[in-house]
Structures are given as structure tokens and as C-alpha cells.
Amino acid sequence: MNASKFDKLLEPIQIGTMKLRNRIVMPPMVTNYAADDGAVTERFKAYHETRAKGGVGLIIVEATYVHPSGKGFKNELGIYKDELISGLKELTETVHRHGAKIAVQLYHGGRQTTSKVTGMSIVAPSAIPCPVKQEMPKELSVDEIKELVEAFGQAARRAKEAGFDAVEIHGAHGYLLNEFLSPYSNKRTDEYGGTFENRMRFPLEVVKRVREEVGTDFPVIYRMSAEEYVTGGLTIEDTKIFAQKLVEARIDALHISGGVYESAAMIIQPAAIPQGCFVENAAAIKKAINSKVPVIVVGRIKDPVMAEQIIREGKADLVSMGRALLADPELPKKISEGKVQEIRKCIGCNQGCIDRLFQDIDITCMINPLTGHETEIDLQTPAKNKKKVLVIGGGPGGLEAARVAALRGHEVILCEKQGELGGQLRIAAVPPHKEEINDLTNYLISQVEKSGVRIIKGKEADTKMIREIKADAVIVATGSEPIIPEIPGIDQKNVVTAHDVLSGSASVGEKVVVVGGGLVGCETAEFLADQGKQVTLIEMLDDIAVDVGSLTRGLLLNRMVEKKITMLTKSKVREILTNGVIIEKEDRTEEITGIDTVVIAVGSRPKNELLKSIEGEGIPVYAIGDCIKARKIIDAVHEAFRIAYNL
């Protein structure tokens, strides 16, 4: 696609005194790459340098705590003491070498952290715990509020001394400034609570103090949740007024987001949330402030065509493409070079990023194993010893292994027994809200084809083929197959697998029982409910979808309730009948009748027969993905990358 189609997206823009080379922003995303005390690390620098090299206009560094009481994550970046300035200066110099501008987000976690992270009592405008973190905060005194206003000011001073081009004040997502602004979390009765004017006082005092420290010619951005998506929380009507006050306070740009921890799916939106979900709110705020300062919009913006359209239609002035830049740091460069079709698009899975962050570990990206490992891996340097590599299996692991091995300069043959590539990705893209997985499938196939891999389709690999090819190494990525449990009646004609249903190879009646309440079972149940089927889902554990990330899971369960899917937990299917099932629930048996079809979704087992047969061939053999153990796509892709890179 011609780069001229993205004239607006690639057009320079001014934020205060800061001129950006284009309108693509990398928004702040906590990585857990900093040192324990919040200092910059080599890993942190390399991660940002890679995005700067990729052509982004502005990098806004992750939520960076201005005071020890505001630390929100184990290895979050800090800016709370002068000793951190030297490391931050190294970071800004690194980014500047590649033509990007860099800002830092000044942040305090408020009640949305824990004393385990901060090492001290957590604080908030009112002694009301965050329903997610469930720890009682200490209500801040007026003197303590003044101390935190000063902490933001001093953090801004440090940012300027460290060479940042701007600062962003984090007033969104339910953190401290947002907590003061919102009637949902602020129940104070003094000058910092009650009326909207009083609730605005603390954030506006922070803005004023920051401006005093950095001066009038240093850009200050404010990030805000246009809506909180909780009962009694801030609405767009509230935040339009607040945006006007921020402009009066000499803010240089507004960064529009949404949500708080209780509505966290609106902060880091899974694939079920529409792309560009905050565009209309950004447009409303832009109109409310009469376009006096630039407006940045975030929210599942991954498609350059959409990004261009947002700016062209005047709904925002810049677009934040966060997870899109985790998936492909070269996204801006590819747009400018007319290589849009080569962009590796984020699929909104959250498996590598926010799901890991919520487990208190470092982030990566499901579809880009390089994310967070930029100091360890150099794909530009060819392997010293070129090999002939046979990859068996054309699913996510096999495709990634073939892609990376070819990039390293090896001669690669990819064998897939089916007539098309993609493997389990094809099935995974069928359930509701999963169609973006096709973006990954298409990317991997196109890259494998482009890299000169010899592809053999419709032929099953065996030891004879391996001998004939004379491979120096074999990568086995044969995947998994559905587990068929030993239940009386399992061999009846009314029994099918979830794989059969999603692949379209099985017909299903009007009343259906799905056995198994993991991700596949839940997605299959929803898929069938969307077809008008009456679905009952049976799970032996205490809960369903326990193998799903929290944000995706919450939305999935809500949809299942809305679609009237009956969910039975702590229940085992003891027998399958011609028109129903017998279940055991809490030491009693029960018969469910009138069932047309029983769908089995109790997991998968490795398909590793070939692996066992070739281990004696005297050739190095590597197994990846589900043929070792049935797991997630991220496991297959990351294992494939590592093994292929190290051949």
C-alpha cells in the first residue's frame, strides 16, 4: 500500500515546543524491566531503542512513580529521587539517536497498588479499598496531599534534567489523580472532595506545580479516562468540563483513554472490545476544548488505515498504538515505506503483555518473542553454520520456526500434512471475537513464503522423507489432538468434539451439552449459542474458564450469561445417553434429557508419534508446542523462535 495514503498519519505535528516527525505515539505501558529501585536497565533501554529505530514519533515511557507510596508494580520505573536521573538520561539519549521524541509519564498508584509492592501503607483520597486490590488505603491528610503535589513537581524537574522532551501526568485508569477527580472513589468532605470543583483541586494543583518546575516552554501532557465505566463514576460529560479546566491550566496536549481497575477491560482492551473504542470520546473532548491543544487517542488502534482515518476526520490529532508496537516495533517505518502488508498486527490476545503483568512478571508479546529480549537476540546476523532444516507441522509453532530459521540463513523445508497452512490457528479464529487471529496466520504464512522456505503441503512426513531430505536438524511441531475421555456412551453418533464443531465437519442439533469448561469449551458454547442453539456447559472444577486471562475471561463470562448459556460447575458427566447425559454433582446423580448433541471439549493431548519414531535416526530433533504438551499459542511461538534462533 502506497505511503501517500497515510499523509496525515505521517505528517509532523507540534505539541507545545516539541515537534514530532509523525503522529504515531507509543503510549506508556508498564514492562517490569526496571531495577528493583526503579532504575533504568540495559533491557529497558534496548526495548525503547528498538521502537525508536522503528520510526515512532513520540515514546511516552511507562507509568513512572513519583513517590515510594505510589509504586504500582514490582519492577516499575521510578523518578522519585535524584539518583535515578543519570539512568534516565541514558534512556533519553538512546532514543534521541534515532530521531524520536521521548516523554515520561508521572504517576502515583493510589489505592490501585498494594503494600507488598510499596513496602508501606497505600494511600488514597478516601479510606475505600479498590475492589480489585482489596487493600484498605490510608486517607491522605491535607499535608500529605501537599507532599505529593511537590513529589510530582520534583519528578517533573528530574525529567527535564534527564533530557526528556515532555512529561505526561497520569490522571487516568483509577490511579491517584483519577481517584481524587471521581465521585466513585473520593468521598472526602473537605476542600478536596464533594463538589466537582473540589475534586478537581488536587489534579489541578499537580498540573500547576509541574508547570512551575518545568517552565512555560516545556510540553506537559495530561492523560485522562474520558469515562470510568463504573456505576457512579466519571462520564464523558464530566471529563469534557475537566478537559476545559486543563487547557486553562496550560496543558499542551490531552491523551484520551478510559476505565479504572474495576473496568480494566477498558484500559487494556481484549479482542472482544471494538478497535478504536475511544475515538468518539476523543472527538467529543476535542470539540469541547475547541481544538485548542492536540488530542491523542488510544484504544485498540492497530490498523494504519483506521489511524489515518481518525486523524483525517479530525477526531484526534495523534494516535497511540501501544500493543501494536509491542507486536511490530517497525510499524511506523513499514507504513512510511509502503510495506503495510508486512506489519505483524496485534491480535488483542493480552497473553504476553497485560496477562503477564497481572502475574507480577515482565511483559513480552505473544506474536513477537523479541519483545523484552532485544539485548539477547540479533536476527540481523546470519547463523555461523548453515543447515538444512526440516520443519514438520504448519501450525503457529512450525510456521514461526520456519520463518526464523530462514531469517538466520538456513535452508528450510516445511512439511504440512493438510492442504493448507495454519494448523490450530484456523480453528482458534472461528469463535466469536477471535477472527483477528487470522492476522497472525496470514502474517506467518506470507513471511514463510517470502523467505524462500520450500513448502510441502498435503503430505505426511515420515522417517523415509527425513532420510531422503538429508536434513541436518528436524523441528517437530505436529501439535495436539482432542482428548476423548472414557465415558460410557462416548462412541455414540450424537457425540462430536469441539474441533469438529469449529472446523465445520460436524452438524449439531438444537439442544447441546458441551463437556468441558475451559477456554475451548466456553468459546464453542458461545459459538453455538450465536447460532441459536440451546447450550448447557458442564465443568468438573469449581469455576469455568480458569485457563483464561482475567480481562478476556470477564468479558467472556458476561457474554455467556447474556446468551443464556447454562453453566454447571462441580459436575462430572458419568454417562452419555442417546438423548442426554447423566451427571454427578456434589455426590448426587442427575439426568439431563432432550439433548441432541454432546460436544467434547476436555482438552488436548500431544501428537508425538512421529517424534518418537525419528529419535533413533541420528539427527538432532527438536520438539515444540503442543506436541510436547498442549498449551497456549504463546508457548508454541516462543519455543519455536528460541529453537530456530539457536540452531
Image (spheres, rainbow, N blue to C red):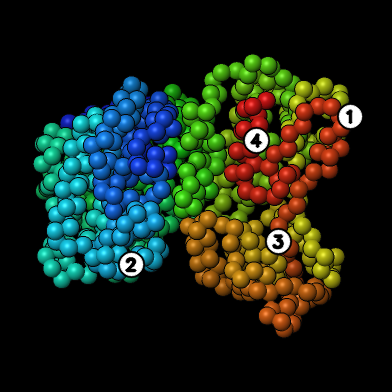
Q: Is residue 41 left or right of residue 530?
A: left
Going from N to C along the chain, the mark reached first, 4 or 1, is 1
In the rendered structure, which amino acid carries the disc numbered 2? Met
Q: Is residue 236 left or right of residue 529?
A: left
Mark whose residue sits in front, 1 or 2: 2
Question: What kind of element bears circle 3?
Answer: loop
Real-space CA distance between mark 4 and mark 1, rounded to the nearest whole angstrom: 24 Å
Residue 158, image x, y percentages: 21, 36
Mark whose residue sits in front, 4 or 2: 2
Mark whose residue sits in front, 2 or 3: 2
Question: What kind of element bears circle 4?
Answer: helix
Going from N to C along the chain, the mark reached first, 1 or 3, is 1
- The residue positioned 34% from the left and 41% from the top of the image is 38
In the rendered image, which residue does mark 2 sit on?
Answer: 136
- The residue positioned 39% from the left and 28% from the top of the image is 49
In the rendered structure, which amino acid carries the disc numbered 3? Ala
Callout count = 4
In the rendered image, which residue does mark 3 sit on?
Answer: 601
In the rendered image, which residue does mark 4 sit on?
Answer: 640
Real-space CA distance between mark 4 and mark 2, rounded to the nearest whole angstrom: 44 Å
Mark whose residue sits in front, 3 or 4: 4
Q: Which of 257 and 97 is in front in this view?
A: 97
Going from N to C along the chain, the mark reached first, 4 or 2, is 2
- Classify 10 Å Cα crowding around label 3: few (below 14), some (14-19), many (20 and above): many
- Classify 10 Å Cα crowding around label 2: few (below 14), some (14-19), many (20 and above): some
Going from N to C along the chain, the mark reached first, 1 or 2, is 2
In this view, 572 is above or below 401: below
Question: What kind of element bears circle 2?
Answer: loop
Question: What kind of element bears circle 1?
Answer: helix
Going from N to C along the chain, the mark reached first, 2 or 3, is 2
Q: Nearer the viewer, residue 505 or 76?
A: 76
Going from N to C along the chain, the mark reached first, 3 or 4, is 3
